[in-house]
Image (tube, rainbow, N blue to C red):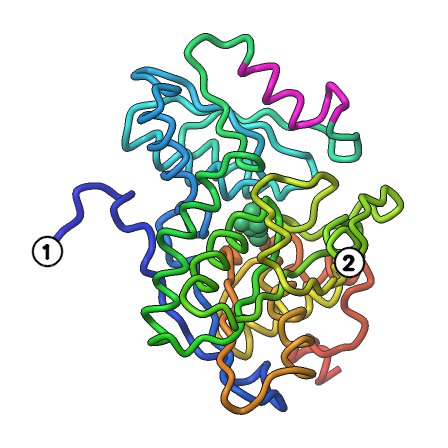
Amino acid sequence: MYYNSIIDTIGNTPLVKLNKVTRGIKGTVLAKVEYLNPGNSMKDRMAIKMVEDAEKAGLLKPGGTIIEGTSGNTGMGLALAAIAKGYKCIFTMADKQSMEKINILRAMGAEVVVCPTNVTPEDPRSYYSIAKKLNQEIPNSFYPNQYDNLSNAQAHYESTGPEIWRDTEGKVTHYAAGVGTGGSMSGTARYLKEQNPAIVTVGIDTYGSVFKKYKETGEFDEKEIYPYLTEGIGEDILPKNVDFSLIDHFVKVTDKDAAIMTRRLAREEGMFVGWSCGSAVYGALEWARQHLTEEDMMVIILPDHGTRYLNKIYNDEWMRAHGFLESQEFATAADILR
Ligand code: PMP
């Protein structure tokens, strides 16, 4: 048995029970471990879907160039699709993203343009604006625009949702996911709610992002927007892939709570995952603690792998410098014997 190309191995990631970080919580909490995709993130699913839909629509032609603004994981998925199908890739990224993510994309043959983080999306220097400009000026180029391209949510409607429904044998009662472009939450939620409208969805947002306030008040409040560190979730725009009617509740999580939970997932569950996985689990468990009953089954999607954050949240010096590690809980043996 073999696959014809690495992109054929995308999807069908396992659901794994969380056993330790869920202590004191009623019901069953399962993680969907998306780092087991070939590009080490769930974004492989939507990247291949955006490329194939663009080919069908005649927007991407042989020898074309894919240009996208990405926090790294979409870029990896697009790079895999481009290699399999013979396209070039240029990615624009905000400079707050890990150097690892930039180097990984370069390793996959993509050109990466690094842009300033703390400028508005409309600013000509932003990674959104630079991607659009390159798309306008480079002939035969395609700008997937993962924020507003509904192939993104559709990929999760066609794969992530059905996998969760199948693997829980229809027993899933809650679905929780971090919200960035909104694709993984909205597409999966649409499928699951079609199967069982009683399924409750919990979107995880960050402090510094507009989603929670918008859901609760209908107001796009610019005062909610300020710089934060967590990568991949929260936005200062309202992407078309965020379908607020499918997201029942939002929980906001701080950079610090997310970072500490991410490290606990590695040490206590053996899941070496990325920072937004800590956000998703911390926020989902906060919800679960108050609302889950013994019969409930919550699925939390864990978007990516820990390698991309080795020099940030998995680095004790970095954690201390950001005030995220206060105790000696990670002291060395030498510290103890001193
Ligand atoms: N976590 C990480 C690490 C991501 O790269 C993304 C994608 N932006 C998300 C979470 C959020 O997923 P989505 O874009 O589907 O809302």
Left/right of residue 231 with respect to residue 271 in the rendered view: right
Q: Who's the residue at 48% across and 29% down the image? A: 144
Which stretch is magenta?
A: 122-135
Pick the front one: 110 or 160:
160
Could you tell me residue 190's position as x and y percent? 48, 56
Distance between mark 1 and mark 2 Cα atoms: 50 Å
Pick the front one: 58 or 325:
58
Q: Residues within 10 Å of mark 2 (few under 14, many from 20)?
A: few
Could you tell me residue 244's position as x and y percent? 64, 52
Residue ID for mark 1: 1
What secondary structure prevails in the magenta region? Answer: helix
- Which element type, helix, strand or loop, lies under badge 2? helix
Could you tell me residue 13's position as x and y percent? 35, 62
Residue type of the residue flagged with mark 2: Glu
Residue ID for mark 2: 216
Q: Is residue 127 magenta?
A: yes
